[in-house]
Structures are given as structure tokens and as C-alpha cells.
Amino acid sequence: MPYVNIKVTREGGPDGTGPSADQKAQLIAEVTDLLHRVLGKAPATTFVVINAVGLEDWGVGGLPVQEYRKQVQ
Amino acid sequence: MPYVNIKVTREGGPDGTGPSADQKAQLIAEVTDLLHRVLGKAPATTFVVINAVGLEDWGVGGLPVQEYRKQVQ
Amino acid sequence: MPYVNIKVTREGGPDGTGPSADQKAQLIAEVTDLLHRVLGKAPATTFVVINAVGLEDWGVGGLPVQEYRKQVQ
Amino acid sequence: MPYVNIKVTREGGPDGTGPSADQKAQLIAEVTDLLHRVLGKAPATTFVVINAVGLEDWGVGGLPVQEYRKQVQ
Amino acid sequence: MPYVNIKVTREGGPDGTGPSADQKAQLIAEVTDLLHRVLGKAPATTFVVINAVGLEDWGVGGLPVQEYRKQVQ
Amino acid sequence: MPYVNIKVTREGGPDGTGPSADQKAQLIAEVTDLLHRVLGKAPATTFVVINAVGLEDWGVGGLPVQEYRKQVQ
């Protein structure tokens, strides 16, 4: 009975605008398999929800992520 | 002092693109009433947040939801 | 394919320490029914997760909830 | 190692459609500093995620937020 | 810059009270690796938070999970 | 109408077991003030929920947080 929420920044992927449908399908398949292998959780009752978050909506180090990357280079 | 988050797949509703404003208003009204009736929670301090999630962003059974439905038919 | 998360303050209930198992079961039953009636969502794929949050961990009006209630009386 | 999620209604800001990039940057900077000052948390491992939620998706007092405001005026 | 939240029912594991520390470490290692392989996300900025949820706090099919299992047997 | 969720590792604070009630009250006060100053949000409808997460339930860099710190020293 797991529920998994994966949040990533909306970037990368085939056209730079975030994960593709195929990449999301791979995340769903593998994280469901992981919970089955490690904890014996049934795939039929494993939910996975993916959110792509805009770059200006994600902060780290006290800065929006793009500003942060400029600083730590 | 409740906070309720309702996540549903973005489908159905009057035009197939997810719950209508009226349907969301009904969810908000009834879930707020439920918390008042069962737990005595004050409606004025009950927040309800609804998220409609894209079909490729929701997985079950190790598959994106549309693929899963094809398999279990 | 809904996922509902209900957060309430840990208080009230039969012994003052939060919702009882029966109250939680009623919340689960009724919110699942609500999503079925309003949006046609299948109960078998409706998850409900309830969290009771300590009073000092919940703030409103800039104060922990118990301080807030003293102020607004 | 903090993770902060800030949800606000999608309104206000410079053009009425929600917080601007500058306002979000200020939220990120100040909440990160707050966790550093109060709890000694390292900014480099403090994540902040901001979500702007549509007005019809946010309920309070058993009503969508815009209806609620009309009632309490 | 991913954030992953894994919620499971508090059961199973070596003593029946939920995942062990080793099982949690394996979940953390593999889900971090998954995001690195599929999306190129840096492990150093991948957070994973695991929550074990009490059985009476998790509902499916309109019932607390233990009641649900009795019904579907 | 903001909702803020602050998750921190359960450590530090006056007795090493996580933030004290006073520290939590300060977080609540200041984050509520921040949303008022930057976005004009009303404190009376600002909720703050704080979760302290066990060290073995928080991963970074593919490791539980305590293992990660040993590695990066």
C-alpha cells in the first residue's frame, strides 16, 4: 500500500522541458519494482505521482535553483 | 484545524479534462462538512486543496495509469 | 485514482488524544464515497491517508494553535 | 536537511496572476535564513518548493476561496 | 534537484513493525540511483523522505487497510 | 490563504531530539510574517505544519543522513 511522490525540477528530458512520458514510465516501473523487491509491496496497490516543478519555484542554498548553480560553479 | 489535499487524475468532468469548478466546489463543501460532523472541526479553519494530476504523471501497478487500464481490462 | 491526505490536530476524540479508530474509519468511508459520487472514482483505487499533527507543530495566525485560541477568545 | 513546501493561492503579485519571480526568490532566501538562524540548518541542504494553487482548487469554510470571501465580507 | 517521499503502511519488516533501517537505506540508495540513471539528477541534491503510516490511518476501498484485506480475500 | 509545511530532521534542539516548542513557535511566527510582508497574505488564514523526520527516514546522496555525513567529512 505504498504512495510515492517524486518531485523534480522541470528541465532536461528530450526537449529541455522536463522528463518525457517514457522517462516517467521508467520511473514508475522501477520505483514500483523497488518497493516490491525490498518490502514485498504489491504493485497493484502502489501509486506513484510525479510533479515537475518550475525552476523559479525550487530553491536551494537560499536561491532559486538557477541562481544557485551560477554561484556554485 | 484540518488540511485536506485531494489528488485526482486529470480526466472526466464535463469536457473530459478533469473536475469542473462545480464538482470541485462540491468536494470542498462535503469534505469540510464531513470533518465537522465526525470530528467537530470548524469549517472556518478547514483548508481543502485539490490537485488534478496528468495521466502520464500517475502510476499504478508499475505503469502509467492509461497503460495500466489497458492491461487490467 | 484519487489520493486523499487528511491532516488534523491531535486532539479531541474519545480520550482527547485525537480521532479514534472508528472516527478514522468513518472519514475513510465517507471521503471515498464522496469521490465516487461526485467524480465517479473507483473506491478500490482510492487511497486515504490520515495524519494527526501535534498541537505545537501546527501554527495559525503566526502562533502555535493553542496560543492562537487563547488570543482569539 | 530541511524541506519546505509553501502553497499559496494563485493571485496577487505584480500582474494579479500570483507571486513574481522576485517575490519567490525573497521567500526562498528568507525561509532558508530562518531555518539557519533558528535551527542551525545549512542553507546548502535546504530545499524550498513553492506551489501556486488555482482559486477554484482551494477551499476554506466549505467554499472555494472566492465564494468564501464574498460571504465573510 | 529531486525530492522523493515514500509512504508505506507500518507493517512487515524484520519484526512486523515496518521497514528496518537496512531496508530504508536500500530504498534511499536505489531510488537515488534511479533518478540519476533515468534523469541525470545529482545524488548530492536528491532528498528521500520515508514515512511509515499506521494501519488504521490508511484507507483503501473505503475501509481501513486491515478491514479491506479481510473483504477482498 | 497559504499552507506551509516545514520538514526537518529530528535532531538538534535543546536536548538533541529535535526543535523545542519555542523554536517551533519562532518558525511559525516568522514564516507567517514573511508571507504577510512579501505577498500580503493574512496571518489568520496562514497554516504552518512542522514535521520532524527520523534520521534513518531521511536520505541524501543515496545514503541515510548520518551515513552521508560520515562520507562527506
Image (tube, coloured by chain):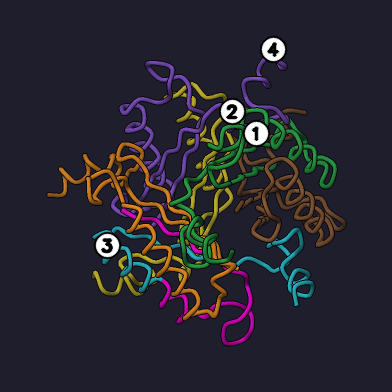
Chain colours: A orange, B green, C brown, D purple, E cyan, F yellow
Q: Position of residue F63 (x, y in %)?
A: 35, 72
Mark 3 touching mark 4, by CB under 8 A? no
- For disc 1, the neighbor class at 10 Å (few under 14, some 14 to 19, many from 20) is many
Looking at the rendered structure, whether the residues under marks 4 and 1 are on a common chain is answered as no
Q: Is residue F14 left or right of residue E38?
A: right
Q: Is residue C21 left or right of residue B17?
A: right
Foreground disc of the pair 1, 3: 1
Q: Amino acid at mark 2?
A: Glu
Bounds of the magenta segment: E1-27
Q: Chain of mark 1?
A: B
Q: Chain of mark 3?
A: E
Tag of residue D56: 2
Residue E44: mark in rendering: 3
Q: Is residue E6 magenta?
A: yes
Q: Are marks 2 and 1 in contact (CB under 8 Å)?
A: yes
Q: Earlier in the sequence, mark 4 or mark 2?
A: 2
Image position, residue B35 (x, y; %): 78, 43
Residues marked 1 and 3 touching at CB (< 8 Å): no
* Local secondary structure at mark 2: helix
- Residue topped by disc 1: B24
Q: Which residue is mark 4?
A: D73
| Gap in angstroms between the C-alphas marked 4 and 2 | 19 Å
> What type is the residue that disc 1 sits on?
Lys
Vertical order, E72 against C29 (above or below) = below
